[in-house]
């Protein structure tokens, strides 16, 4: 797989400008995925809350977005940003694990893949592209324990290191961590 910035790749993966996340197609894909159980149970996962969070996140240090397109259709995307030394997930979180406390780490915020594109390795490619070549030795993400993606993350080497309730109206999520090749 080739890597590129802000341009379309033959494989359909691209690193886009941060503002692209606010494009209607990203909101549409997010809304489609988060309308499914177990996400459809709370206001944290509405399109409006996604756009509100993401408008702030695109300005975080190290923000990066990877997307996959099928002709004119957004198949999926993944994005994240750098969590500085000592920073951890907000809300009600378990303690910061010792191995990631005193270093910067990549916070993977979203991995979205529309149903017609699942089971083809595209989600793993998106996440792999986001994680490859990072300066941070670890990445972390929040995963709903009942979501199908949770078991995928475990198969891909992520391990549960605690829990987090990111907002009072949100479910308790598993905090997952993975070491990145340096």
Image (cartoon, grey):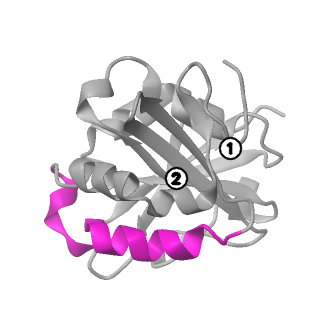
Q: Is residue 57 magenta?
A: yes
Q: Is residue 40 magenta?
A: yes
For label 2, count other residues whose C-alpha is less than 10 Å away and answer few (under 14), some (14-19) or many (20+): many
Q: Position of residue 54 (x, y in %)?
A: 49, 68
* Residue 169 in view, yes or no: yes
Callout 2 secondary element: strand
Instruction: Name the residue tied to disc 1.
Output: 6
Cα distance in 3D space between marks 1 and 2: 24 Å
* Residue 154 in view, yes or no: no
Q: Residue at x 78, y 43 (%)?
A: 134
Q: Position of residue 46 (x, y in %)?
A: 25, 68
Task: Please identify the dominant SS of the magenta region.
Answer: helix
Foreground: 120 or 161? Answer: 120
Q: Position of residue 98 (x, y in %)?
A: 72, 59
Residue 14's label in the rendered image is: none
Callout 1 secondary element: loop
Foreground: 86 or 95? Answer: 86
Vertical position of residue 16 compared to residue 128: above or below: below
- Image: magenta residue range: 37-60
Q: Position of residue 23 (x, y in %)?
A: 43, 59
Vertical position of residue 158 compared to residue 176: above or below: above
Instruction: Name the residue tied to disc 2.
Output: 141
């Amino acid at each position: 797989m080739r890597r590129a910035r802000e341009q379309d790749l033959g494989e359909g993966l691209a690193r886009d400008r941060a503002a692209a996340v606010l494009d209607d197609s990203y909101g549409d894909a997010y809304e489609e995925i988060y309308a499914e159980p177990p996400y459809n149970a709370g206001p944290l996962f509405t399109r409006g809350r996604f756009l509100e969070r993401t408008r702030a996140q695109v300005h975080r240090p190290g923000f990066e977005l990877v997307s996959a397109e099928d002709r004119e259709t957004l198949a999926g995307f993944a994005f994240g940003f750098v969590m500085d030394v000592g920073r951890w997930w907000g809300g009600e979180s378990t303690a910061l694990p010792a191995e990631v406390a005193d270093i910067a780490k990549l916070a993977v915020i979203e991995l979205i893949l529309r149903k017609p594109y699942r089971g083809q390795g595209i989600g793993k490619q998106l996440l792999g592209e986001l994680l490859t070549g990072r300066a941070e030795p670890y990445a972390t993400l929040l995963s709903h324990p009942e979501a199908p993606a949770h078991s995928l993350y475990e198969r891909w080497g992520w391990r549960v290191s605690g829990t987090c309730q990111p907002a009072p109206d949100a479910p308790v999520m598993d905090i997952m961590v993975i070491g990145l090749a340096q």
